[in-house]
Amino acid sequence: MIKRTPLVLGKKTYQDVTNDICSLVEKVPGPKFFASLISVKALFVFYLIVMGMIVARGMGLMGVNNPVNWGTDIITFVFWIGIGHAGTLISAVLFLFRQKWRTSIARTAEAMTVFAVMTAGLFPILHTGRPWLAFWLLPYPNQRGPLWVNFRSPLVWDVFAVSTYATVSLVFWYIGMIPDLATLRDRAKNKWRKRIYGALSLGWRGTGRNWNHYEMVYMLLAALSTPLVLSVHSIVSFDFAVSIIPGWHTTIFPPYFVAGAIFSGFAMVVTLMVIVRALVPEFKNYVTIGHMEAMNKIIMATGLMVGYAYGSEKFVAWYSGAPYEQYVFMNRAIGPYAWSYWLMVVCNVVIPQLFWLKSVRTSIPLMFVISIFVNIGMWFERYVIVVTSLHRDFLPSSWGMFHMTFFDFGALIGSFGMFLFLFLLYIRTLPAISISEVKPVLNVGHEGGENNA
Amino acid sequence: MESNLRDSGQKSDQQTGQTESVEASGSPKYWLSLEQWRQDPEFKKMAEKEFLSSPLQNEEGQGGWARREFLKLMGASLALTSFGCVRRPAQKIVPYVNAPHEITPGLANYYASSWSDGNTGYGIVVTTREGRPIKIEGNPEHPANRGGMSARATAHILSLYDPDRLTAPRRHLFNEGRTNFESVSISWADMDQEVVEQLQKGGVAVLTSSLLSPSTQALVDDFSQAFGGRHYRWEPLSQEPVRAAAEACYGGASAVVPDYRLDRARLILSVGSDFLGSDPKAVSLSRQWAEGRKPGPEMSKVVVFESLMTLTGMNADERYRVKSSQYLHILMGLLHQIIVVQERSRYAGNAQVIRALQAYAGVARSLGLDTAKWAELASDLWANRGRSLVMASSAEGPDTQAIQVAANFLNSVLENDGKTIDYRNASPRAFQGSARDLKDLITGLEDGSVKTVIIHRSNPVFSLPSSAGLVEALRKAELVVYTGDRVEETGRLAHFMAPDHHSLENWGDGEFVAGVYSVQQPTIRPLYETRAFEDSLLNWSKASDRASLRLRQADSWYDFLRQYWRSEIYNRHRSVVGDADFESFWISLLQKGVFDTSRLARETEAPARNFNLNALQLAGRGQERSTDSDGFELVLYPTVGLADGSLANVSWLQEFPDPVTKICWDNYLSVSVKDAADLKLRQGQVVQLRVGDQGLEVPVHIQPGQVDGVVGLAVGYGRSHAGKVADGVGVNAYSLLAYKEGRCQYLALPVQIEKLGKQSALAVTQGHHSMEGRQIVVEATLAQFNKKPDANIYRHKIFSLWSEHKYPRHKWGMVVDLNTCTGCSACVIACQSENNVPVVGKRYVMQGRIMQWIRLDRYYVGEPEDATAVFMPMLCQHCDNAPCETVCPVLATVQSDEGTNDMIYNRCVGTRYCANNCPYKVRRFNWFNYAKDNFKAPLNQALNPDVTVRSRGVMEKCTFCIHRIKGAQQQARTENRTLKDGDVKSACQQACPTGAIVFGDLNDKESAVAKLFHEPRSYAVLEEFNIRPAVHYQTKIRNTDKLKGDSNKKEGQHA
């Protein structure tokens, strides 16, 4: 019988696993970590300043204009929302399919989802002309009639979709962490630590009843999250697909967006995992090359789906006979923004094809570079969709160009500051790998189990 | 109250206390009852609370936090809190003590007045709200403009509230060489004293532009006479050669710039005349042109020969590109073709004529024109004799006078004189600027014979090149008084700046059409310590014992004006006035704004004048020059927006996309497509221009349809002392004028172009110029229209799965006739003024953030080198199935039950989804708090209080002037009647000189708009999306054989 590659390397015992994962939270981190934290924090502060200035002075600081009324904010919003999808997919869908390899990356992927959705969620608010009134998009009883929101508007659907997604992801993430938080509580030597983790672990005692309820809730939440993987980005795509703008008004958008989201999400997981592996060498035993390779395979598969969508769009534009649509797709490929289109195609379709080679798939430096390319490509995919469709629509008299300003770049780059800052804090304050889920996949106790030696 | 109660409570305490102390020493002296006397404990208890009903003691006795205590403390803390952080500073409002009876808050008052700008004037109606003018509209009763307006006339309102106006007289503290420019304020009395002292020394000169006002003219004449001075008239862009040519051709009595009657002409030939665009009379000429453009057998045909691309050329049926130095050849060549080749007219065979025309045989061939077309044009002109019209460039060039003589001759040959050339009704006061006056003034200043110069309504230091030597000459004058409303370039050289009232603050009059007298009445009390120029003259002239009787008798300018009207207008036209006395005549004049004595003369044709053939000698001079100069010719031209540049500090006009190039906030060198390719020039590349010893650096604009070998540059830009808006915008092209003996040459200036490595971004509001084969502006030839009125319109089969919106009462709609829309953009400014639309500045225009609610789309058709253009005013289409409405998450833009798409500003969050989903891209977003910068006092007074000023972060767009609709509905309701067609006019419709915009109720089957809406020539843009716009456009009909656009139309595309 061919032996499966073990999911955790280093012949870990249960004790080792607990120690490895908890020590991250319990020990004072090294200078490498602090250097990283301070630099991303600086970026985060810069982001806050940029956003503060936009709120104070007006959206005019960014490059948006008429006809390109949506710009970096919406592009980056869709980008971050897309990033989140891999987390849900790994933690919920792969859980339901009993993919055991997910256990060591699920927690971090899920955390990435939560932080990505948090980062994303700020953008649509900040992109409005009067962000302080953005709560008007929520249907709540009010004294203006009451005046409800426009349920026909995809932006309202978006509010529901994103807020549901954020809530479910957060709850799912948190519920999954409870046993581990209890472990941290039990190991805590400091009073405050004990109290905080104690409160967070919601009185977990590890009884059979606890586990029974926990498993049930976890599975239910996984089942609840699974449709969200499909629905959230479908609804985000409706922002575009429901409009009448050529290049947006396309039925392929929902599946295309979902595939793209998973694609970019996995790329982001790979990027983060490579960074985490570098920052915390102990993780290499838990997030193995095998994990990375599995994710790279998904990247390659979804990359092909995205490539198919690009081709399909072109075909449909040609086949439809609609001149406006034909023009938009021609303009994407050969117009003034052709560079962004081809950058997108190269990054998303061509470069991931390198993953056909096992040597590339299993090379940490190469997969890091490729995942970065995919991230860039996916940002530009949204850039192409938003900008090239808007900048030349129906009446040529209103055609225009979109140029990013300092504030566009600030918001885009700064958002990584926010995301990474949250992520680094997470690594050192919460159990970054699910202790309770990793232990069952160890071969401890199995006959002939390698880890039992 | 509370403290009072408490006081009384305490008092009662004290009283009881006293009682007790008395009690201590025995029984009370005075007792109320036996119980008291007995000192019954029951009674004592009762006496403690003397006031049984008082709540005070009840509660106080309980101790702790009683209700009152709590309330007191809470009140105090609230007061303290609110004292600590004052939320809004107190703003005191003071009501009128005696409310002016003519002002009803919330209702507008309208004053008929007039506006004039040097050589033209319009009857206007000034809308005032709560005593301040907010909008200028055309007076439909006035024959000069019949309600139409130019962009500049409308924008003039903003100059009233211009923060850069002078607020009081000032004196310059000159050093010896008058090279410093510090100034101090001075009182009017002190200034008058010094001026009068100087005036009495004699050598007085009054320099003005043409004065259209008969009474001001009379006053200036009297003033000059009183001091033995002289009145000099000069202006840039003068039409003096036209007058001179008329004099040479028809004798001295005819020395006027004639009125043209395009409405009577069936064939209009323009050789370099931009009668629909930058011509000073474009408003009235456009209206006449539109009258003749009704598609049908009587439709006129316009043939244009020109060098730069102009609105006239873009609207022409046939357009030929020739150099400005070839205009004379065209006219003389046509004369040759008609008289010599085709042997037509009574001049055929006339030896003198043949001799003069001989040199122009074969002009068509030498200029590379199609000879068959040429002959056909000559035949057409002849066939339409008496109903044709030849107009030629009046801009001063080397041949201008010859060109005018040739045009006059052609008109005489074609028997147009008196018919389409109306020489009788031209204003005798317009275009009186004279080169000789300027020359004399400069000479006089130099030799010292002119000691004092009073400069009014003229800014010669800005509009003359330095070679004229005016600056040096003015520095020699003993006293220079400048009456401009701001410092300006000329005012800097003046000893005194005696700011005149704004025309909206001042009395006045005007004769814009012969025999049509208009009155100008003040619509607001002068905002500042300014004084009417006329009052200044009156004050000063009273010091002279030679002042005329009427000067001495007049108490004020108003008095003088009325006296003048009584004696010179009222008394002389008693037959027209009827039996009204002067007071009632005056009142009715103020109501109507105009007194028309020449209606009959305008309706009848005048006899043809006798053409003096000797004048042809003037025209003969052109042949000495070659038809093809080697280098580039520079043409300096006025734009539709800024014209001579006097209103340059009006931000609306700076942000006014040029109707031809769609560029604002700059002037630029327009270069033809081929020349740009030859010289490898890019759009926006900076070049160095050299004309003689003068040089300028300007960015290049590549202009389709422009003739090769000619480059154009607009004047009016490059102001240095006009104010914050205008200063430093563009370059002063006047500095390149060739000056000779008072005459300035604008056309055919030899110029050298040198490329520089710099790039200067131009603020273009329309970046793409082709319709890409889409059905946007539909064009058809007259023949196609005659065969099928809806020719070239592809109609989509549209159906709906849902029931349509219901509009039970009104359904507002609009029809824009593209056939008569010239693209002049007067509607753009009218809308801006009506709807408080802010300007954003050059930088943000370049970013695509212009706010104007009407965008005048201009598309080129044909090959770039020889392109022509079509126009389309694009505003919110108020679609029934509006794409913007479905996507707004907060319902900030909704359909009304009257068919308008309403924007609810205070609900708008600013997601901008609506703007994205608008297929016409007519929505405008407030990216910043524009209102703050735009409407800083005193500019805020120009705001229309009926229209919300939009804050930052909200979307805005055309409202179909909803406030006017609601106003008219209220009016109708008060008058207990139903709304009738014409009650509601949109601001754009009102301003349109050609009546191309018609607005009204589509539910009213009898309304003008309803009839036009369903005409076969009407269509909806982007009809196939079933969004059902409430605006329909009508096909542009060209009276020609073949459309230029046909060549680049893609087959099989109707979208």
Image (tube, coloured by chain):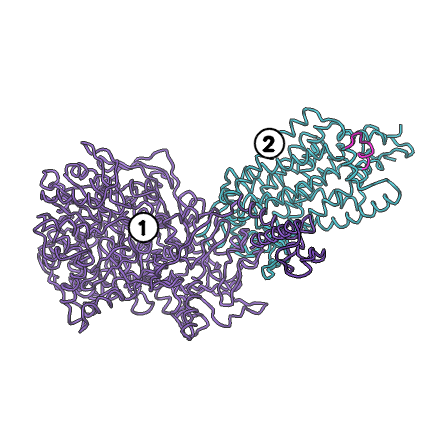
Q: Which chain carries label 2?
A: A
- Magenta region, main secondary structure: helix
Q: Which mark is residue A42?
A: 2
Which residue is identified by label 1? B159
Looking at the rendered structure, which numbered label has been put on residue B416?
none
Q: Does the magenta stretch include residue B1030?
A: no
Q: What chain is colored purple?
A: B
Q: Position of residue B365 (x, y in %)?
A: 23, 51
Question: Which amino acid does the dot numbered 1 rest on?
Answer: Ser
Q: Give the range drawn in magenta.
A: A182-191
In the foreground, B353 or B789: B789
The verdict on a common chain for dots 2 and 1 is: no
Q: Chain A is drawn in which colour?
A: cyan
Where's residue B89, x and y in %?
47, 47
Say above or below: B193 vs B990: above
Q: Look at the image and tell me whether residue A177 can be seen.
A: yes
